[in-house]
Image (tube, rainbow, N blue to C red):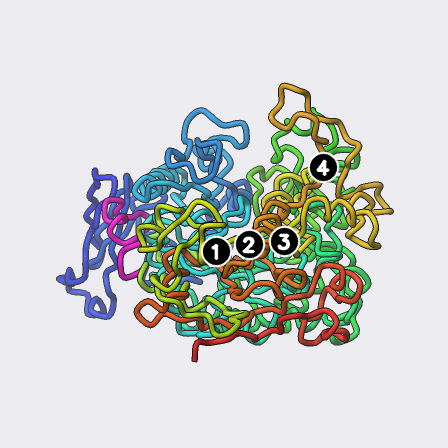
Amino acid sequence: MKMKVTKLSALIAAVILSGCNDSDNDDSSKFQQPQLTTGSLTVIEKDGYQFKDHNKDGEVNPFEDWRLSASERADDLVARMTTEEKAGAMMHGTFSISAGTLGESESRLVFEGGTPMFPNNTVLIKDRFLNTFITRQAGAVQDIADDNNRAQEIAEQTRLAIPLSISSDPRNHFNEAGGASIGAGEFSKWTETLGMAAVDDVEMVKEFADIIRQEYLAVGINQALHPTADIATEPRWGRNNSTFGEDAHVSRRMTKAYVQGLQNSDTDLVKGGVWGVVKHFAGGGPQENGLDAHYFVGRKQVYPGNNFEYHKIPFKGAFEAGVAGVMPYYGMPIDVKDGKGVAIDEVGFNFNKYLLTDVLRGEEKFDGVILSDWLVAGDCKADGPCRKGLQTLEDSTMNPFAYLAMPWGVEDLEAAERAALFVDAGVDSFGGIDDPSALLASIESGRLSIERINMSVKRIMLNKFKQGLFESPMVDSAAAKAIVGKAEFQAAADDSQRRSVTLLKNEGDVLPLAVKELGKVYVSGIEADFAAGYGLTVVDEMADADTIIIRTHTPGLQAFAWNPFAVIMPMGELGFMSDAQFAAQAGTVDGLRDYELAKDSMNDAQLCYPDSETYPEEHPLAGKAVGRCEYTGGATYDLIKAAIDSGKRVILDVFMIRPTALGNIADDIAVITANYGTSDQAFLDVITNKNGAEPQGKLPFGLPFNTAVVEEFGLEDVPSFAEPEKDTITQYEFGFGLSYK
């Protein structure tokens, strides 16, 4: 059979479209020629079609033949891979970027040289054989697309030219928390998932997911480390913001629609789809005292209400949609049994064979990729800051990636044995790990069989084939700008923001107020110039105002000993009070409120270290303890109190990144709204009823009176509407929301 071989010189070449069926092969008409993109690979013509020569042998091998099934192609590819290539394929690395701060417009991927954090990307791709990466690159859309194309071009230079899966944390919302989400930048900017739950419209969620699918693919991102199917049953937990709230059944509907829109199919991952990874099985959220499992003192997950099964419900929506990936959580369940009475091992979910193999693979029939959470396979040394927190000046200058790891319950195992236990449990891909040496050691010692490794590698490759990555991994970077954040996408996003606003209090039916009816306005949390441009008459002093508008967010506690996550995602305190009030009560209430004594008694670790070393005089934080905790709501409370005392009309709007406790201020404020990511424009549209905009949101979680009642009566695993002491705990109930009508 004749073959014609041609070489493509352009970085990206659309090799052929449908219609080249001039072969005498009678079966040729049943195949649709896919578009091929490549930077350097040879394209082979065979049977009237074109194929990329990934392994550079001049033949169309089964894994290169897009006419075959994804499973057949994956089997052939895995059989050709070396052990080193397989181990590399099981790593989900992190792209090295040049900018020191996420969100800087000049951030670019690093292909030569290196950075303090990571080896350069060329080394990871060509020498360690990684072909899956998370990108945290922000900035100009065309730069992101160009850099992803460059990375794919380097992947083509490897022996088998396996294309890269490039993943991202959420990047289409308001809350930016490094390590969990990325600023929207030029991407369309939507209400957070809590806001989508507040609207409870599955079609809106599906439209959202479909739009971000198009934006991701335009810049070369083809895997999403979301949606989050955790349930916000513990209001103090710092990651409530990324959930669909506290109702498992709402979350199940939302999660299903999200996966369907993302993967471009109602039941599977297909071409044109972004590979979804639902997280965090078997449900994050019920963290002991609301601490986060990113850090050692927060590693325990508890179920005092015996509500373990409730937290699995949302994942069923993802399974119904054929989700391609599942990420287990860091948390280590303590003294819990599942619905069948099986005691769950007290190790992090990523190491739990019963949950991952028996339940996830067996009962739930999930056959996609299990991707571990980040750095779970890493080392957490007994005497270092990973377990103790930062207490010295030397600690505070450390690169966090030099000590961060979350192998809860198996911290003392050797690296190779921990890697083997990981795979034994059912994990296919090592999140945040770019060094395959521990996995290789466990294979070479015989601890792990190559047959088991082949299962994981096939699952990873199968998703790449389903997406069509082997045919078209590259993108038109010049066209990306016209797709990402385009007007119709942002219009839909703006609509989600307006619809999600939740009206909690409207004393005397004050709202809506036309711009003129607001009178003279003092604003906080809104740029004065923007407010003036909107038409408001802005004044500089509260005393001169008719209306005071304050936009703020849920307060919290930042635990600097546990950088970076306990600072980026504040937890603990939910209410507004003065700094003096906080200091007066912080050491007097039992439980977490006694912040300085929030210890892990078994391991001599605690949340805050007020007696740790202090920063020197020349340091910007001079005199502060390295391991301090800081309350973030004091200045906002002072502002709110001044507004109340002024006797003016006050409108308070709170970005609910967690449930906010309003018990000590709600009675004194005429209008209170909750938002979950809303621009100043959208917010003002709602309070002025511009073009008919009005609040449609209903609370996706209950709001407690204060933090003390949560600590005393709350159960970490039980939603507010099912708490035994719900009337004592909850001021504004789940599902509450007023309307103008």
- State which region is magenta: 472-489
Asked whether, in this view, residue 717 is left or right of residue 453, the answer is right
Residue at image mark 3? 238
Q: Label 1 crowding class (10 Å Cα cut-off): few <14, some 14-19, many 20+?
A: many
In three-dimensional space, the C-alpha distance between marks 3 and 2, rounded to whole angstroms, equals 33 Å
| Front position in the image: 727 or 212 | 727
Q: Amino acid at mark 4?
A: Arg
| Front position in the image: 28 or 165 | 165
Name the element at disc 2: loop
Residue at image mark 2? 646
* 491, above or below 407, in the image: below
Q: Earlier in the sequence, mark 1 or mark 4?
A: 1
Find out whether the residues at labels 2 and 1 contact each other: C-beta distance under 8 Å: yes
In three-dimensional space, the C-alpha distance between marks 4 and 2, rounded to whole angstroms, equals 34 Å
The residue at the far right in this view is: 601
Q: Quadrant of residue 141?
A: top left
Residue at image mark 1? 548
Nearer the viewer's eye, disc 2 or disc 1? 2
| Front position in the image: 676 or 214 | 676
Q: Earlier in the sequence, mark 3 or mark 2?
A: 3
Residue at image mark 4? 628
Q: Earlier in the sequence, mark 4 or mark 2?
A: 4
Q: Quadrant of residue 547?
A: bottom left
In three-dimensional space, the C-alpha distance between marks 3 and 4, rounded to whole angstroms, equals 18 Å
Q: Amino acid at mark 1?
A: Ile
| Front position in the image: 705 or 678 | 705
Q: Amino acid at mark 2?
A: Ser
The residue at the far left in this view is: 22
Please state the horizontal and vertical placement of residue 524, each as a whole percent of the image. 48, 49
In three-dimensional space, the C-alpha distance between marks 2 and 1, rounded to whole angstroms, equals 9 Å
Q: Is residue 74 visible?
A: no
Q: Label 3 crowding class (10 Å Cα cut-off): few <14, some 14-19, many 20+?
A: many
